[in-house]
């Protein structure tokens, strides 16, 4: 474990009973000072892994090191981490100031030091003026800040956050995402967040581990995950995706020739830039925002076919256009609404040319 790593997880497995494998031989390193996200659907093992880091669960196999120290047998309150729970777990009978000071009082920190550290922690989360209020006098976002201040006041080396924004409404959640990033940058410690919300992970994290059924499928930056997913699950889970079954029919230098199943009769075999090895069955994927719609056949060299508009759904800043090819394959295109009437010309039952560039096409080998 080098100096840039704060957490090292090595072949960690967690079983509950004989039938539930919650975490399956997970290995990953988390760097000092980074904002790291564990992302995946419900039941994928992400919260179990976070609880193993916190010491609330014991791994069935494997090893966890935090700041170079083995964590086997180390109690949660002895670890250099603190945790913010999904429910915030704020004491309702205490004031904001008393909530933040609680952990320091338990460890018998001198009174003068408690006062100083509580004031610093409240200032970090902009709650100085609400120090004497009770939790029921606060908004959801303010209660979340109290939980953050209480966790940060003990100066942990790592802050663990279990779905900390899930109880907030959409607009406040987006605001708190920005605030959490700024807070993490200002305190300079490692944040590890568990979330099932892909947009939350993409907008906040420096790196993301995507999990499914106990396995870590890919660890990468948000851009790498979105543009270069390593398997069908990651491609489909991160953002929206048009995904087709394909068959490799030829390999060239840094290119692969693929016959794309349901749409092969309309587009023929397609040559896609691809530097890795590929053979047999593969997935062919294209992001909806990279799909172009035209009433006239595109003249440039693109992958193109005709499809009928089944539905146009308006979302204000963009519209989602759902289409179906003559073979029954479904395709979705995202269209930016640059004006109020940007796509008024596209209506249900229109037959349009659907096209995209070969270099925007992903080849998924697993």
Image (cartoon, helix red, strand yellow):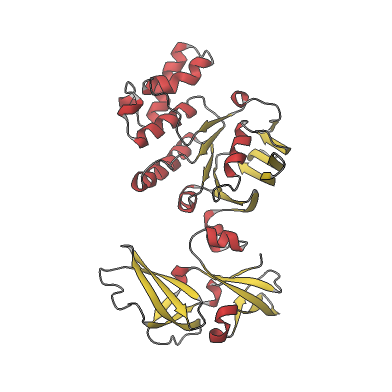
Image vertical order of residue 159 relative to residue 21, above or below: above
* Residue shown at the point (36%, 21%) measured from the top left: 95
- Res. 346 image quadrant: bottom left
* Residue shown at the point (55%, 77%) measured from the top left: 358
Q: Nearer the viewer, residue 138 or 124?
A: 138
Q: Nearer the viewer, residue 91 or 77?
A: 91
| Quadrant placement of the C terminus | bottom right
- Res. 71 image quadrant: top right
Where residue 88 appears, as percent x and y from the top left, is 45, 32
* Residue shown at the point (50%, 20%) measured from the top left: 103
- Res. 173 image quadrant: top left
Where residue 137 appears, as percent x and y from the top left, is 30, 28
Can I make out residue 117 in this image? Answer: no
Image vertical order of residue 194 relative to residue 133, above or below: below
So how many labels did they put on this image? 0
Where residue 276 appears, as percent x and y from the top left, is 68, 68
Can I make out residue 15 in this image? Answer: yes
Q: Is residue 168 left or right of residue 264?
A: left
The extreme left residue here reads 340
* Residue shown at the point (70%, 39%) measured from the top left: 17
Image vertical order of residue 205 relative to residue 302, above or below: above
Where residue 279 appears, as percent x and y from the top left, is 71, 73
| Quadrant placement of the N terminus | top right
């Amino acid at each position: 474990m080098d100096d840039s790593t704060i957490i090292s997880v090595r072949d960690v497995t967690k079983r509950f009973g004989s039938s539930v494998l919650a975490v399956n031989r997970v290995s990953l390193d988390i760097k000092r000072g980074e904002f790291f996200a564990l992302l995946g659907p419900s039941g994928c093992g992400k919260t179990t892994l976070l609880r193993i880091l916190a010491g609330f669960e014991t791994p069935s196999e494997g090893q966890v090191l935090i700041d170079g120290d083995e964590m086997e047998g180390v109690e949660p309150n002895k670890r250099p981490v603190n945790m913010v729970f999904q429910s915030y777990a704020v004491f309702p009978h205490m004031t904001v100031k008393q909530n933040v000071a609680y952990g320091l009082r338990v460890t018998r920190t001198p009174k003068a030091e408690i006062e100083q550290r509580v004031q610093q922690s409240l200032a970090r989360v902009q709650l100085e003026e609400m120090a004497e209020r009770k939790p029921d006098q606060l908004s959801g976002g303010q209660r979340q800040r109290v939980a953050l201040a209480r966790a940060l006041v003990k100066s942990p080396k790592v802050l663990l956050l279990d779905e900390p924004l899930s109880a907030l409404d959409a607009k406040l959640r987006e605001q708190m995402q920005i605030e959490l990033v700024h807070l993490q940058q200002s305190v300079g410690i490692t944040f590890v967040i568990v979330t099932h919300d892909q947009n939350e992970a993409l907008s906040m994290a420096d790196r993301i581990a995507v999990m499914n059924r106990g396995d870590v499928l890919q660890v990468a930056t948000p851009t790498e995950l979105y543009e270069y997913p390593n398997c069908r699950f990651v491609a489909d889970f991160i953002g929206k995706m048009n995904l087709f079954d394909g068959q490799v029919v030829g390999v060239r230098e840094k290119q692969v020739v693929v016959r794309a199943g349901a749409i092969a009769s309309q587009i023929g075999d397609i040559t896609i830039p691809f530097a890795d090895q590929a053979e047999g069955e593969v997935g062919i994927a294209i992001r909806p925002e990279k799909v172009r719609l035209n009433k006239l056949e595109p003249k440039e060299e693109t992958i193109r076919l005709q499809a009928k508009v089944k539905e146009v759904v308006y979302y204000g800043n963009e519209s989602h256009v759902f289409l179906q090819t003559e073979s029954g394959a479904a395709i979705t295109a995202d269209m930016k609404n640059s004006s109020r009437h940007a796509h008024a010309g596209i209506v249900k039952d229109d037959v349009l040319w659907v096209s995209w560039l070969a270099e925007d096409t992903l080849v998924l080998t697993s």
